[in-house]
Amino acid sequence: MKVLVVGGTGLIGGEIALYLQENGHAVTLMSRKPTTVPGLADMSYLQGDYINDDFSDGRLNGFDWLVFSAAADIRNIPQDGSVSPQDFYTKANDEAVPRFFAAARDAGFSRAVMVGTFYPQVAPQQIGVCPYVTSRHNTDVAVRALSNEKFSVCSINAPFVLGNIPGMDVPYISALEQYARGNIPGLPVFAPKGGTNHISSRSLAQAALNALNKGEPGKGYLVGDENYSWKEYLELWFEAVEIRWNLRLEKTIIPCSLMSLCLQAPEPR
């Protein structure tokens, strides 16, 4: 199949693109800027900004399947105070993502998968409270509602994603490595309270292909690999760099990546 992977220059989209190609599909990456990462840079490329572009120009024609892995999160919010988180998420997620899926439907795509987040499913009490969780919930519902007899849409909602594509720098993963090596001055060795689920980018890629092949139209799938406390998770990093420090469990919840949004992930079960 001819597959367009939106956000295909990042870790999640890139891993999905590589996996689809390994399984015989013709993959085109779409992002605002092309990548120089080996393997991905050799793929077909389509320039596009799903938030601001008008896709009625025909550039989406000729594809069979869509994988969308590009919705906005806390890392994308302008830090100059020019826009509130709620307004930013509304434009970038609630409005732009369903609009892009509708353009893909009108261009003749037959199947589509959106890579979403686990927050609306594991912490539904934050819908209407946390702007990010609310936005991702609204986006997911609106996108899946576009399914019809000719356009099958489902979502795979992932937890924290861990992976590696040679030649690609993933800032939050690089930061964890440097932390485990003791290269961040002034940051003590500790583990936040609680924990969450994690999934490898490879597992997520496998889930994406399964969803394209077998996903039920309008369905949202919760996916994941392993539950870890933050202590267990950070110990794996310390072990990976051969540092055997004893982590002490803090009573204070320390913000960690998207955990800083407005909720603590559920305890591992």
Image (tube, rainbow, N blue to C red):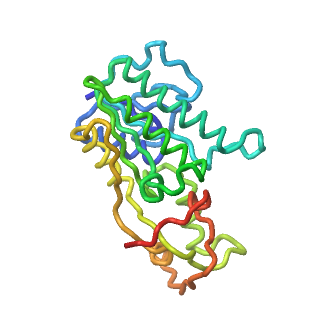
Left-right relation of 78 to 152: right
Residue 65, percent from left and from top: 31, 29
Of the pair 51 and 23, the residue shown nearer to us: 51
Q: Is residue 45 left or right of residue 151?
A: right
Image height of 174 relative to 81, above or below: below
**Residue 100 pos. (x, y %):** 47, 27
Regarding residue 162, the answer to whether it shows in the image is: no
Q: Residue at x 35, y 53 (%)?
A: 222
How many numbered markers are drawn? 0
Which image quadrant is residue 174 in? bottom right
Residue 246: % across, % down: 54, 87
Residue 20, image x and y in percent?
Answer: 29, 40
Query: Dividing the picture into quarters, in which one does residue 264 lie?
Result: bottom right
> Residue at the spot x=49%, y=32% of the render?
97
Q: Is residue 67 above or below residue 237?
A: above
Image quadrant containing the C terminus: bottom left
